[in-house]
Image (cartoon, rainbow, N blue to C red):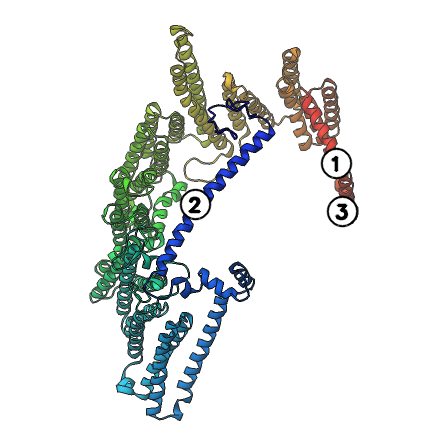
């Protein structure tokens, strides 16, 4: 930073310049700094523009000194001199004004020129066709030949003169007219039978005509610097071979398309190499081309060079982009058609079946053609697009898989066709991962993923067999302990080819997941390693669990295999360190555990053995697990299996279902007790550690880890206790037979239900003794109340108030004693007492008759409501209001029913509409009233 006046360098912020005392602070100084900065930027921009001017002036001087008399700017009409000439030198108009005048039109002059030339050329082609087809008979053979030959020769010669005069666009149009005339000459020659062409087959003659015209246009493009003849020749060259193969088989047609696609690919490679040579770094000259010529060829607006210009091949530089585009499009179309024909032939053979050994040569040839097409596509992607064309890579991988499997399809049974595609897909994936010479990680990853996905898709035809093998065992749950039934005595539902496919997928996924080599060459493989490992685990588990269904093993052998797999997976879950792997293994282990349990239910002994083995496996996993959440899951699973074993023991002893349910309830109580003891042990261990080491030296991380390890198992045990309790309640309530039927039957036994609810209530009440489970007391109280009411109903008690009111009064007294301090919620103090007193009477009121109970209940509920509102207690207000509403509904129900019968039907509709109108008119007021009511209830204690 310098002083604006004396140019002194300032190293720090100052109020004045040390040399000239110029003020450097204030609005004027700030504006001066901004002006100096803007001027500096302008000077930098001016320097850049001057350098560019010098460079352009040197280019124009070189153009002036070239041997050729016409400069690139003069030829193209876009240089400074052209603009000046177009503006009119006599009128003195400037080039800028001329340019602005040309840009005001809706369409450019070049577009108008192209439109006129296109329409003129089209009309000439139509006229030539009409002359050849319609007016042909008025001339003799000599006249016809002379007219066509002369007109075609003149047409193809005119572009030479037009190019010499700089009319390149007109020359392009006339050249295309010449192409049409060449086809018309061929048509005429066949019609008159010239040189025996009339005896040639139509497809063969058309192929020859396309080839001749294509060669003629290719040679024509070398003579004149035109852009359209060479792309036209490339397009026409796509037709000869397919037309020659139309009368042959599908294999021959595919071969013709393949050869054409290979030729297009070679041309693409040649053009790509030439393009890379043309894009050499600045200063590097191509052989035989000077810098001035390269500059002139790169100047904008150049439409072509005059024939014979030194160092410029006619049509080479101007046509190269168009030629590459046309060749790429032609290659894509022909490649897709060839691949489609080959895939269609393979699909037809796969669906219809191969009838004899004679189909093998055709299938071999089809596979070879598909492989050639795939390798051609991969070469184009690798050499031309540098691996960026992912779509062609994916398509080439698919075609290569089909080509690798096609030769072997006639040699194997139809059931073994899918393993062939699996092997082919995995081979393509391995080649994409490890084969040298492939450019780009994106190309490798696309090929590897495509091959792997195609290999996985070969499992889809066996989906029905897999689903049946797993679901079939669940269909026999209505016949527990009645012996093994199902596919053991029938035809195998899972074929060996499916196991081969799953084994191959397992091996391939595991190999890539553990192999470090492809990580450097394949994009995104590091993130896919975990997914590949999970896929290997899934396919391996499927393979192991489907073995019995494939080889019709006995029930004992199948169960032993399932138990072994479940135990191994549970052990792997405990040994895993990464959370993601832990849950993948846990999911697989849980699924196999369910399958093992369902399979074991076919026999009594197998049920006991399976439940015990699985309980021990999950218990060991809970004790050795490294992940905290896994300890809870493993401990809970072990507790559930223990409950199932208790239920199985009860069934083995011949206990009725309602009595066996209490075994589940006992197991639930034991699980809840174990959870409480585990939490207490964790707290005691933390307290002992703090007392031993002292609060100042206690390691919070160590004590917290110890407590967490103990508490994790407690959470799983507690959850399992709740599940077992719900299972026991359902069994005690439904009275479903434990053995022989899977459907509930029988009426609930109220004394049994009462006892079951009492057991659950005691379990929840005991759980509420834990400091972190105080809320369980509410659920425990509810179950105890349900137990009481169920027992009263079972004893045919009509005056339930004789049993409920005394206990309610005692509970009210306890609640009042607890709420004296004013800090206890009214629900905690009076909720249980009021519910136990009001709810049974309400139920009895709806189930009985008479006027005394509704009167007394309404009076008591009104008193409770008034007391709650007076003392601002939420529980009495809510419970009293609800009970009073129930009493009012009970009393008004007969009148409402009579009114509904006797009043005309339109009256309720009218009243409802009027009510809605009133509510809508006073909607905001009603909302405010409801909001105030809610706030008033919320402020209550």
Q: Would you call the spot at circle 3 few (<14 residues within 10 Å), some (14-19), or many (20 or more)? A: few
Dot 2 alpha-carbon crowd within 10 angstroms: few under 14, some 14 to 19, many 20 or more: few
* Label number found at residue 480: none
> Quick one: quadrant of the C terminus?
top right
Figure check: 772 above or below 271: above
Between 756 and 831, the one lying in front of the other is: 831
Q: Would you place residue 680 above or below residue 364 in this image?
A: above
Read off the residue under disc 1.
924
The residue that appears at 27% across and 36% down in the rendered structure is: 560
**Residues at marks 3 and 1, CA–CA distance in whole angstroms:** 24 Å
Place of residue 422 in the rendered image (x, y in percent of width and height, measured from the top left)? 27, 51
SS at circle 2:
helix
Q: Which residue in the protein does label 3 denote?
A: 909
Direction from residue 774 to residue 891 in the image, left or right: right
Q: Mark 3 falls on what kind of element?
A: helix
Residue drawn at point x = 21 percent, y = 64 percent: 360
Q: Sequence order check: which comes first, mark 1 or mark 2?
A: 2
């Amino acid at each position: 930073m310098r002083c604006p006046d004396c140019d002194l360098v300032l190293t720090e912020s100052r109020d004045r310049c040390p040399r000239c005392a110029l003020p450097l602070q204030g609005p004027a100084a700030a504006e001066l700094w901004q002006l100096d900065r803007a001027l500096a930027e302008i000077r930098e921009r001016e320097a850049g523009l001057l350098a560019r001017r010098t460079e352009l002036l040197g280019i124009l001087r070189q153009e002036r000194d070239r041997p050729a008399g016409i400069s690139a700017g003069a030829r193209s009409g876009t240089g400074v001199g052209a603009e000046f000439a177009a503006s009119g030198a006599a009128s003195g108009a400037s080039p800028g004004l001329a340019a602005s005048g040309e840009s005001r039109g809706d369409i450019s002059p070049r577009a108008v020129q192209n439109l006129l030339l296109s329409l003129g050329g089209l009309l000439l082609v139509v006229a030539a066709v009409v002359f050849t087809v319609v007016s042909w008979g008025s001339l003799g053979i000599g006249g016809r030949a002379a007219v066509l030959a002369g007109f075609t020769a003149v047409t193809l010669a005119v572009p030479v003169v037009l190019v010499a005069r700089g009319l390149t666009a007109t020359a392009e149009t006339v050249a295309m007219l010449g192409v049409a005339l060449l086809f018309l000459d061929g048509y005429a020659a066949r019609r008159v039978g010239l040189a025996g062409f009339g005896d040639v087959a139509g497809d063969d003659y058309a192929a020859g005509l396309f080839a001749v015209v294509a060669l003629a246009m290719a040679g024509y493009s070398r003579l004149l610097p035109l852009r359209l003849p060479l792309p036209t020749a490339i397009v026409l060259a796509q037709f000869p071979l397919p037309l020659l193969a139309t009368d042959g088989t599908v294999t021959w047609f595919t071969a013709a398309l393949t050869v054409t696609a290979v030729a297009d690919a070679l041309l693409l490679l040649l053009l790509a190499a030439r393009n890379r040579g043309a894009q050499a770094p600045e200063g590097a000259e191509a052989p035989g081309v000077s810098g001035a010529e390269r500059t002139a060829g790169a100047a904008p607006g150049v439409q072509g060079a005059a024939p014979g210009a030194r160092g410029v091949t006619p049509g080479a530089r101007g046509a190269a982009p168009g030629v590459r585009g046309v060749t790429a499009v032609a290659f894509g179309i022909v490649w897709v058609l060839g691949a489609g024909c080959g895939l269609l032939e393979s699909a037809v053979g796969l669906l219809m079946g191969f009838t004899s050994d004679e189909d093998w040569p055709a299938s071999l040839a089809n596979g070879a053609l598909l492989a050639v097409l795939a390798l051609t596509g991969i070469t184009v992607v690798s050499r031309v697009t540098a691996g960026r064309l992912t779509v062609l890579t994916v398509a080439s991988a698919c075609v290569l898989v089909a080509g690798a499997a096609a030769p072997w399809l006639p040699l194997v049974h139809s059931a073994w066709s899918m393993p062939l595609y699996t092997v082919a897909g995995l081979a393509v994936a391995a080649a994409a991962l490890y084969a040298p010479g492939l450019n780009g990680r994106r190309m490798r990853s696309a090929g590897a993923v495509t091959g792997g996905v195609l290999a996985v898709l070969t499992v889809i035809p066996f989906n029905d067999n897999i689903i049946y093998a797993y679901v079939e065992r669940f269909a026999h749950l209505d016949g527990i302990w009645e012996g093994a039934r199902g596919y053991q005595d029938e035809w195998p539902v899972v074929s060996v080819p499916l196991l081969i496919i799953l084994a191959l997928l397992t091996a391939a996924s595991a190999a890539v997941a553990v192999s470090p080599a492809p990580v450097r060459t394949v994009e995104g493989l590091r993130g896919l390693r975990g997914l590949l490992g999970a896929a290997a685990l899934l396919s391996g588990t499927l393979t192991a669990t489907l073995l019995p269904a494939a080889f019709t093993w006995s029930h004992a052998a199948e169960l032993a295999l399932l138990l072994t797999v479940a135990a191994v997976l549970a052990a792997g879950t405990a040994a895993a360190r990464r959370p993601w792997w832990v849950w993948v293994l846990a999911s697989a282990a849980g699924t196999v555990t369910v399958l093992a349990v369902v399979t074991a239910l076919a026999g009594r002994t197998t049920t006991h053995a399976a439940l015990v083995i699985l309980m021990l496996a999950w218990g060991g996993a809970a004790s050795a697990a490294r992940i905290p959440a896994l300890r809870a899951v493993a401990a809970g699973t072990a507790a559930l299996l223990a409950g199932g074993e208790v239920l199985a023991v009860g069934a083995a002893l011949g206990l009725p279902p309602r009595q066996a349910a209490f075994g589940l309830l006992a197991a639930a109580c034991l699980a809840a007790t174990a959870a409480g003891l585990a939490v207490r042990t964790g707290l005691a261990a933390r307290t002992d550690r703090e007392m031993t080491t002292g609060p100042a030296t206690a390691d919070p991380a160590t004590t917290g880890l110890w407590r967490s390890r103990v508490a994790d198992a407690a959470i799983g045990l507690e959850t399992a206790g709740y599940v077992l309790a719900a299972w026991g309640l359902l069994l005690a309530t439904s009275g479903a037979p434990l053995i022989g039927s899977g459907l509930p039957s029988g009426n609930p036994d109220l004394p049994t239900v009462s006892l079951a609810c009492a057991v659950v209530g005691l379990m929840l009440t005991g759980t509420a003794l834990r400091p972190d489970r105080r809320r369980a007391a509410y659920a425990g109280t509810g179950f105890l109340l349900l137990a009481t009411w169920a027992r009263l109903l079972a004893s045919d008690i009509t005056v339930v108030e004789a049993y409920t009111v005394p206990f309610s009064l005692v509970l009210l007294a306890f609640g009042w004693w607890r709420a004296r301090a004013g800090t206890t919620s009214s629900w905690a103090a009076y909720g249980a007492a009021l519910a136990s007193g009001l709810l049974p009477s309400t139920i009895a009121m709806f189930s009985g008759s008479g006027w005394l109970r509704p009167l007394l209940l309404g009076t008591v509920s009104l008193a409770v409501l008034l007391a709650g509102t007076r003392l601002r207690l939420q529980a009495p207000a809510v419970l009293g209001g609800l009970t009073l509403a129930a009493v009012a509904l009970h009393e008004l129900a007969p009148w409402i029913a009579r009114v509904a019968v006797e009043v005309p039907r339109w009256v309720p509709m009218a009243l409802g509409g009027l009510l809605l109108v009133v509510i809508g008119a006073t909607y905001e007021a009603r909302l405010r009233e409801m909001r105030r009511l809610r706030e008033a209830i919320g402020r209550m204690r």
